[in-house]
Image: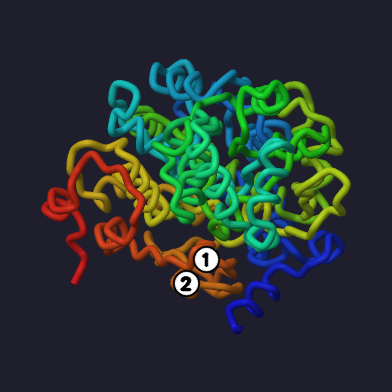
Amino acid sequence: MQRKKDDHDAHVFSRRDFLKTGMAAGLGAAGMLDRMPGAVKNAAYAGEKSGPEKPDVAFGIIPLTDCAAIAVAHEKGYFRKYGLNSTVSKQASWANIRDKVALGALDGAHMLAGMPIAATLGIGMPAKATITAFSMDLNGNGITVSNALYERMQKADPAAMRERPLTARALKKVIDADRQAGKPPMTFAMVFPVSTHNYEIRYWMAAAGIDPDRDVQLTVIPPPQMVANLESRNIDGYCVGEPWNAHAVTAGIGHTLITSYEIWNNSPEKVFGVNREWAEKYPNTHRAAIMALIEAAQWMDKPENREEVVRLISRPSYVNAPEAVVRMSMTGTFRYAAGEAPRPLPDFNVFYRYAATFPWRSHAAWLLTQMIRWGQIGQPLDILQTAAAVYRPDIYRDAARALGAPAPSLDNKTEGIHAAPWTLTEASAPVTMGPDRFFDGRVFDPARPIDYLAGFEVRNMSVSLAALAKVSDRGAG
């Protein structure tokens, strides 16, 4: 009963509450920074380090609302403030982002949280050491299905469809019925094989006993093409970031079943990724970019600025979607179905609060467990060592220190143990953190990743737990 109460208390906020106070926590340092004259801040930065070695930089984005940190840093002059002459280019797919950063055609980019890890390990591409020192946001995705599938799920298990967070129990009954009738598996889409979307839809399905590699077909579709493919019945559902869930709902062609926030409260989503050799060759340039992005995130998470963010990223050069569609999730509400009233979901998009910009190595370690769980990694590796090579909180702390912004002193944290807001004291200043629960109640201890993997009944691994244990999980007692 206590857990249900905590869950209720953590979610019952009105849109007005969000716009007034929902993003106030953790912004004290940002407010002090805003009141400091720009010349003083720039002088402090220039006094510590020399200027950028490479002032002309090109950054890539995908048309999703969580490209906002790069868009705002460019449009509001934060990159320019730290000596960077930025250009921002919209890319057609995550493969384009990956390849152009690897080849040096882009200096850095809006990346899926798992992409720097995959690039470093050579998953789906020749290995190219890639790092991130900045997390662009938390949450932001949803799982949406066609109206036809939604109706079938309602008939299959009405009680399950009333649950919140919604499980995949009703979907499993539909899948089982199709199998008995000799029908082919349904097709679901996600945006990229190493995306959080892939791991989220798999995690959600597997928790109900659905094997995502055998019971359904999973395919890759770029985010802007999801709605058209759902409408043409090429797919039965998808997991994607905003505004492409809201777009399907607004058009009346789909129902959103669950958001990524509900699957894992305040889970990592996108990062700013660069080649490691680029970061080592241009450390001041990289640091300047991180400082600009931190300031942009601080500005975005102030309630009074969200409407301007909506107007900015709705433009054709960024998301290219109606402001009304973009506004819904960006201002603290979410609508699951056409005709329903928007529901309060103040943490659907988090850009700075809850240490959202910090590159937690425990996030990287969790992503590695999912890559292993679903057979994307075929050779044993040290999970924590790999996470430490790719996620670089040391670079983040250096940039945050120059800004006077708080930063965690820990590199890892246990995920899944907080049902309500809490305070992180292991930091340069206390940081208010949000809930971090998984919808199935599991806990991820980054010191025991092998134990975590062993706890899943549904998994399709290409490397044995015993082989992993020989090189990883050395922190386990």
In this orientation, does residue 40 appear? Answer: no
Q: Which residue is mark 2?
A: 417
**Residue at 29% of width from left, 58% of height from top?**
449
In this orientation, does residue 94 appear? Answer: yes
Residues under numbered marks 2 and 1 in contact, where contact means CB atoms less than 8 Å apart: yes
Q: Is residue 434 left or right of residue 415?
A: right
Q: Which residue is mark 1?
A: 437
Disc 1 marks a residue whose amino acid type is Arg
Which image quadrant: the N terminus? bottom right
How far apart marks 2 and 1 lie (CA) works out to: 6 Å
Residue 369 locus on image (x, y percent): 33, 49
**Residue at 33% of width from left, 56% of height from top?**
457
**Residue at 75% of width from left, 33% of height from top?**
313
Q: Which disc is residue 81 wearing?
A: none
Outermost residue, front side? 181
The secondary element bearing badge 2 is classed as loop
Residue 167 locus on image (x, y percent): 58, 56
